[in-house]
Image (cartoon, rainbow, N blue to C red):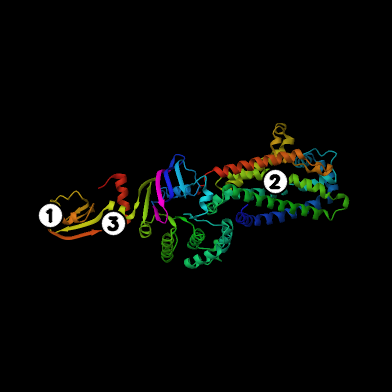
Amino acid sequence: MNRGLLLRAFRESWPATLVIGLVLMGVETLLAFVLPMFSAQLTQEWLQIDLVRGIVQAMLGTEIAGRIGPQMFQSIPWVHPVVLALLWAHAAISCTRVPAGEVDRGTIDVLLSLPVSRWELFLSETTVWLFSAAVVLLAGLAGNLLGSLALPAAQRPEVGRLLIVLSNLFCLYAAVGGFAWLVSSLSERRGRAMTTVFLVLLALFLLNYLAPFWQPLEKVVFLNPLHYHRPIGILASGAWPWRDLGILLGAGASMWLGAGVVFAIRDLRTV
Amino acid sequence: MSLIQLENLTRHYGARRGVERISLSVAEGVLFGFLGPNGAGKTTTIRVMLGFLRPGGGAARIFGLDCWRESKAIKRDLGYLPGDLHLPSWMNGLAALSIYGAVRRRDLIQPGRQLAERFDLDLRVKVRDMSRGMRQKLGLILALAHSPRLLVLDEPTNSLDPLIQQSLHEYLRHLAAKGHTVFFSSHSLGEVEQLCERVAIVRDGELVADESLAALREKAGYEVSIRWAEPSLALGLAPPEFLKLTRREGAVWQGTLQGPAHRLVDYLAGKAVLELTIGRPDLESLFRRFYQREKGGAR
């Protein structure tokens, strides 16, 4: 691995990682603290409304009848739209930097006039991306644990189980990142690449919410990466969701590999 | 030995032509001018040489290595300044030298400082606070700091003030004298004329000349102006075949002399000539005439 490329990638990506990591930490702290505090009110009032119940079920990816309890409220901070939006924003920002971002701002010319192959550049960027993803997710975990500190012991999630949820979320993040790499490799404009990523993610997000209300969508819900991220089951059983992890990682790795191949053989024009 | 070897290099952008069957060879230790108007195909050729674009046909080799497949190895000993230089805005000169030095696994800070002194650049200023000329200087320093065997400079003097241009020209001559090769792309004819020994001219994606400047001048001939004593002489006489007239007005003939000057002197001997001027054409008029001949035939 080329140290100079790693240094450059790190210097380019740390501001976004720091900001998103801190915001995620704050959001997780808030959700982990607030949701259990109002669990009784939420259960007795809000979850009696069909629409709200449907939305919570869509968010958690499972039927909640008989599962309303501390684990349901511990799960919500890991599937909350704000949390997912922050993670996806980080993935879209990090994974569209090379090549779309570098081509767009014209810096790819100087970068690739250095004695490095495109694969070396791609691997260095990927390494820094994965490292920064781990930092962001760990910031989220730290926030969650911090928020839970104020709760009674019975309402706090087990750290071991949270780590499994975090691994699942990391795989979801990797799948989204793999897609963002692929879009970036096919683009010459970073703005266009990020818009494409966000629009597709928004469509998948809506699919997740609409599927319970419209039967035909149930048939394509397997295409949605959110379908493979169900923390409520993990927090309840403590079991590793190997199938979900495998599907998410497989999809992410395939798209990432495709992105690398495209980047290695594509023309780099000035735009 | 040829450092750069392009053979029938062709590259199209969809239906649009980039370059078409360009063949040229650049020897080691040469200041090579790559000349042509904007959009002629200079940058496309350079981007193929740098491995940014895959050739559509033909071959491009530098140091005997294939420009597409062995691009990394080529760039160990190549310095490049793009025509439209962009650097990350957060960088300053020292950070750029440190990071690019780490990529090249060489210390570039010391040679970079020396070059910054030569080009009068403060390396502590961030790119976002630099003027266009300062950024261009930093780009030059990054291209030169590792003392590459081959320098590819695409319009390098854009935005540089005349003193720095002069300093750059001196430095490039010094490098060439030490055996380094400079591939100097420009649309500024005067600059190439001042600096380069050999010139290739590209127009509409095709190579229309690849010769030494001296040979090109010979080919283009001499600018000639003759003022006859009487307008009737100018009108009555037929010009010799080695003198191509471009203007015939009153008592004045203007044109281009092909071949040695003594033939014209012999022709004019004993004739009533008031004034005779034989000049050497500058590259600009040579360049213009060259295209006229290529595109529409000589006048």
Residue under circle 2?
A173
**Foreground pick, A196 / B28:** B28
- Element at label 1: helix
Compared across the picture, whether B109 is left or right of B218 comes to: right
Residue B27 in magenta stretch? yes
How far is disc 2 from disc 1 in space, using C-alphas? 89 Å
- Residue A213: in magenta span: no
Which is more foreground, mark 1 or mark 3? 3
Same subunit, tags 1 and 3: yes
Position of residue B136 in the picture relative to residue A167 (left or right): left
Q: What amino acid is labelled 1 in the image?
A: Leu
**Would you name the residue on which mark 3 appears?**
B281
On the image, the x and y values in percent for residue B81 come to 48, 56
Q: In the image, which residues are magenta?
A: B18-34
Q: Is residue A219 above or below residue B141?
A: above
Residue B296 image-quadrant placement:
top left
- Label 1 crowd bin: few (<14), some (14–19), many (20+), radius 10 Å: some
Can I make out residue A190 in this image? no
Work out whether A249 lies above or below B244.
above
> What amino acid type should be assigned to the residue bearing mark 2?
Tyr
Q: Is residue A132 left or right of residue A52?
A: left
Q: Secondary structure at mark 2?
A: helix
Amino acid carrying mark 3 in the image = Pro
Please count the marks in the image: 3
The circle on residue B233 is 1
- Number of other residues with Cα within 10 Å of mark 3, as a class: few under 14, some 14 to 19, many 20 or more: some
Alpha carbons under labels 3 and 2: distance apart: 67 Å
Q: Position of residue A252 (x, y in %)?
A: 67, 42
Q: Chain of mark 3?
A: B
